[in-house]
Amino acid sequence: MLVLLKKGVSETGASDIAGRLRMLGLSVHRTDHAGQIRLGAVGDGVPVQWDKVREWAGVEAVRPIPVPFKLVSRAFHPHDTLISVGRCTIGSPQLALMAGPCAVESEAQVFTVAAAVARAGATVLRGGAYKPRTSPYSFQGLGEEGLKLLRRAADAHGLAVVSEVLDSALVPQVARYADILQVGARNMQNFALLHEVAHAGKPVLLKRGLASTIEEWLMSAEHVLSQGNAQVILCERGIRTFETYTRNTLDLNAIPVVKELSHLPVIVDPSHGTGIRNKVAPMARAAIAAGADGLIIEVHHDPDHALSDGPQSLYPQQYQELVDQIRTIAGVVGRRV
Ligand code: PEP
Ligand code: MN
């Protein structure tokens, strides 16, 4: 339920109301919008006499939130969530440009790619140190050594860091080096991991599962918000369909759908969304035209020898050209690079 407080209610009045709702067994989350305090009171199966709550001093109205993802919904939180990371504010008119290798492979590799993406205009360096690979015989990532290299390369170029956390036990370690914790497509419904990353107190990049509906994806975001961390960046990265000419089917519908349903920023990963180098730029341009808040793109200076996802990685020069095109498209849709 959404409990709207009267304008001008004091802070003590508001916390009294929140306290009384908690006493009923609900968990209470607050957001302020247009000079009004809004309390999201959630808890399945908790019997509450809402007619009575409506009469409490300081309460203006009580309304149901008509979707299962309560805290993630615009009904609860009408204005866009902004997430500040390093030099960029994700969800603001300035697009969030995240780029880097699929996996951190070596010092030379990550420093070369970091320099190139920073020069092109990216503000966040991506790179996996723990990789979710289909084959156990494929490169699994450099682990903590990779995180150290990624952090040093990012710092050398004024970039923030996003890196994937594969396992709950690794959250403290990844959080020591990364500014944004990535939950990968394969882990979108690993609820224990979602709770653990929420508690790390850092922004979470939540990729859409390979076969997940938008509602399931938003419910996974709800897991993070329900744990008190509202800094979630949604990432559309393509879904599994019957199509075989591309690695995945990049669902650009998700952008306007999510924008209407939720206040959370949504970015697009056209690298995994297509799996094919020369399809990345067209879909990146389309994503920005469709209203995405940013892009996460794989870039490698020597993709033929990349240890993962070389065929979908852009050369640094291609990334530079893409950012220049994105700058033009951004202007048309009221955004900037
Ligand atoms: C990645 O970003 O390298 C990755 C593994 O992504 P996803 O979880 O979307 O497959
Ligand atoms: Mn990859």
Image (cartoon, grey):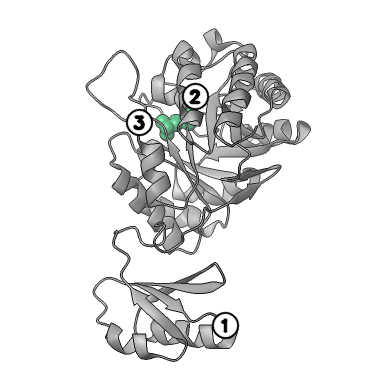
Q: Disc 2 or disc 1, which is closer to the eye? A: 1
Residue at the far top: name it.
Answer: 304
Left or right of 100, for residue 152: right
Q: Earlier in the sequence, mark 3 or mark 1?
A: 1
Q: Callout 2: few (<14), some (14-19), or many (20+) C-alpha neighbours within 10 Å?
A: many
Instruction: Tell me, for residue 284, which label it has, or none.
Output: 2
Q: Residue at x 46, y 61 (%)?
A: 77
Label 3, label 2: how far apart the Cα atoms are: 12 Å
Query: Can you tell which of label 3 and label 1 is closer to the viewer?
Result: 1
According to the picture, the residue beneath numbered tag 3 turns out to be 251
- The answer to whether residue 124 is above or below residue 193 is above
- Of the numbered discs 3 and 2, the one sitting upstream in the chain is 3
**Crowd rating for badge 3 (residues with CA inside 10 Å; few <14, some 14–19, many 20+):** some
Query: Distance of mark 3 from mark 1, alpha carbons?
Result: 43 Å
Mark 1, residues whose alpha carbon is within 10 Å: few (<14), some, or many (≥20)? few
Q: Residue at x 53, y 31 (%)?
A: 295
Of the residues shown, which amino acid type is indicated by label 1? Gly
The circle on residue 188 is none
- Residue 164: image x %, image y %? 51, 38
Local SS, label 1:
loop
Q: Amino acid type of disc 3?
A: Asp
Spatial CA span between label 2 and label 1? 45 Å
Is 176 or 216 nearer to us in this picture?
216
- Is the residue indicated by label 3 positioned so its CB lies within 8 Å of ligand 1? no
Q: Out of 213 and 313, give the one closest to the viewer.
A: 213
Q: Are marks 2 and 1 in contact (CB under 8 Å)?
A: no
Mark 1 CB within 8 Å of ligand 1? no
Residue identifier under label 1 = 8
**Can residue 87 be seen at all in this image of the molecule?**
yes
Type of the residue with mark 2 = Ala
| 272 to the left or right of 31 | left
